[in-house]
Image (tube, grey):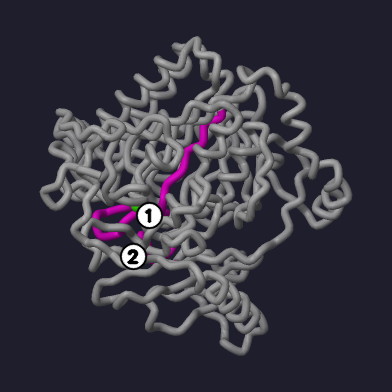
């Protein structure tokens, strides 16, 4: 067992070198995976394509679930999901902050390859991304094979046309456009109401987590008995700051956990309340008879924010950092009858952008255009899918005093990881297999230092052709009225 990562009760899935070579031998058989699955689905029987539910939570740290080792927390519903399918221990968000990871999820590209290396915000002077208008989004792909597509919750990929959900492939949008809410109850950001139902501004009453749960359940119920499959992207804003749990949930945590700090109790309560909502969504899928034909994916967009009491387990750092605590996130995929329950993968290094081709393959489609992600559906289904090491790059551009509008990076290959946490510090090399906590930097003379540096430069050069700001920028142009 890797240090600090609980694994009781789970089958451990390891790939030895021999297994890997054997799998490579079988690769030709696997490469037809999408086609084979498509044939199995039956091109003429759209009803057999699975519903797809992606639950993306916001700033949930590696250790902030009871099944991930949080002893002061009870998250029975997500714990059950983790046990009901395949859980992955080496799953990464594509960025240590929100917008870029969301861009990677919906495009299958590195965030800076689609213009979103940093957070998109209301004020252009502090906005570090503009989603490339030509980028093909996951809901657009799924619509090609008949999916009904819905986003509930946080969009965070643009505030103006054409970068709003209904113009980028979602049939239905029920949620908010912005980067965060300053208040979970009134849902405003900088005093602006970004809550919409499709293109209509709304002003609902209630806690944001409850609203998104309710809207997700309404979507699921309304899809019952419909012939076409649905894609539901449920992007909760919890447990992102501000830490605004319903007070009764705080009291419940304080009664159960004597001695817990107020700060931690509030975060635990916000997460437990989120867990409760996810349980309702799963119940809704089951009650409407759609659970058996649903691929459900659960993950977080970046690590937990240390300053508000988040727990990133044995990992160093948190949100905003390129340390493991900033980018390594909980992950599971559940698909009754297709993904065996109780499996735990401790080897496959995958990330958010891999979900694009994985979901497309599960829907029986192949991806013909250029993407950076790689489907791991074969691994989820228990096939001997080869998984050669690859260079994985993380980027974030940010504008406050610490970052000055510049980008900082990490790159990983096999166990080797080169990273920096601001644009102004030297890159540091670690071997994650031997030093998961990233406490023992290796010398710059190490051969992997130069190799990773070179590959990172190649990536930066490649992404250099993609603008991350719209030119000319009209900073007064807002979503309303377009
Ligand atoms: Ca986030």
- Residue 348 position (above or below residue 125): above
The structure residue drawn at horizontal position 62% and vertical position 42%, both measured from the top left corner, is 358
Pointer 2 residue: 128
Magenta-drawn segment: 295-322
- Residue 168 position (above or below residue 223): below
Image x and y of residue 47, in percent: 61, 17
Quarter holding residue 482: top left
Residues 407 and 346: in front is 407
> Label 1 to label 2, Cα distance in Å?
9 Å
The structure residue drawn at horizontal position 52% and vertical position 60%, both measured from the top left corner, is 110
Residue positioned most to the left: 191
Inspect the magenta stretch and tell me whether residue 298 lies in it. Answer: yes
Residues 239 and 165: in front is 165
The answer to whether residue 385 shows anywhere in this view is yes
The answer to whether residue 266 shows anywhere in this view is no
Image x and y of residue 388, in percent: 73, 58
Marks 1 and 2 in Cβ contact (< 8 Å): yes
- Answer yes or no: disc 2 within 8 Å of ligand 1: no
Disc 2 packing (10 Å; few <14; some 14–19; many ≥20): many
The structure residue drawn at horizontal position 57% and vertical position 66%, both measured from the top left corner, is 432
Residues 316 and 166: in front is 166
Pointer 1 residue: 99
Element on which disc 1 rests: helix
By secondary structure, the bulk of the magenta-drawn segment is best described as: loop
Element on which disc 2 rests: loop
Disc 1 packing (10 Å; few <14; some 14–19; many ≥20): many
Image x and y of residue 213, in percent: 32, 27
- Answer left or right for 234 relative to 297: left
């Amino acid at each position: 067992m890797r240090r600090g990562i609980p694994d009781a009760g789970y089958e451990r899935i390891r790939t030895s070198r021999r297994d890997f070579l054997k799998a490579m031998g079988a690769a030709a058989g696997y490469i037809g995976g999408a086609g084979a699955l498509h044939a199995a689905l039956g091109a003429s029987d759209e009803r057999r394509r699975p519903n797809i539910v992606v639950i993306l939570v916001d700033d949930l740290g590696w250790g902030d679930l009871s099944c991930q080792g949080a002893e002061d927390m009870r998250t029975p519903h997500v714990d059950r999901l983790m046990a009901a399918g395949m859980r992955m221990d080496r799953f990464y968000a594509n960025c240590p902050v929100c917008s870029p990871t969301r861009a990677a999820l919906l495009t299958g590209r590195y965030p800076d390859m689609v213009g979103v290396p940093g957070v998109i915000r209301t004020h252009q002077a502090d906005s570090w991304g503009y989603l490339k208008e030509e980028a093909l989004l996951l809901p657009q792909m799924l619509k090609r094979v008949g999916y009904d597509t819905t986003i509930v919750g946080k969009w965070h990929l643009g505030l103006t046309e054409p970068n709003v959900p209904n113009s980028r492939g979602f049939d239905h949008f029920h949620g908010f456009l912005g980067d965060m809410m300053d208040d979970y109850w009134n849902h405003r950001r900088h005093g602006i109401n970004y809550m919409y139902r499709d293109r209509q501004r709304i002003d609902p009453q209630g806690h944001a987590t409850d609203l998104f749960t309710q809207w997700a359940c309404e979507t699921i119920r309304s899809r019952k008995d419909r012939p076409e499959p649905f894609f539901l992207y449920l992007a909760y804003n919890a447990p992102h700051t501000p830490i605004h749990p319903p007070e009764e949930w705080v009291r419940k945590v304080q009664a159960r956990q004597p001695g817990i700090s107020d700060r931690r109790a509030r975060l635990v309560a916000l997460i437990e309340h989120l867990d409760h909502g996810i349980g309702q969504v799963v119940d809704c899928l089951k009650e409407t008879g759609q659970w058996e034909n649903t691929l459900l994916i659960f993950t977080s967009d970046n690590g937990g924010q240390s300053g508000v009491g988040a727990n990133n387990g044995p990992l160093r750092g948190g949100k905003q950092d390129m340390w493991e605590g900033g980018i390594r996130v909980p992950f599971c995929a559940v698909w009754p009858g297709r993904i065996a329950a109780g499996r735990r993968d401790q080897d496959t290094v995958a990330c958010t952008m891999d979900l694009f081709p994985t979901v497309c393959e599960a829907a029986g489609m192949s991806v013909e255009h250029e993407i950076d992600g790689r489907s791991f559906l074969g691994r989820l289904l228990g096939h001997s899918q080869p998984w050669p090491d690859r260079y994985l790059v993380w980027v974030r551009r940010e504008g406050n005093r610490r970052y000055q509008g510049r980008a900082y990076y990490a790159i990983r290959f096999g166990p080797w990881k080169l990273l920096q946490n601001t644009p102004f510090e030297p890159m540091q090399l670690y071997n994650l297999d031997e030093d998961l906590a990233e406490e023992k930097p290796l010398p710059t003379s190490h051969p992997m230092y130069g190799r990773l540096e070179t590959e990172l430069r190649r990536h930066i050069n490649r992404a250099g052709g993609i603008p991350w700001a719209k030119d000319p920028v009209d900073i007064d142009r807002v979503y309303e009225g377009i």
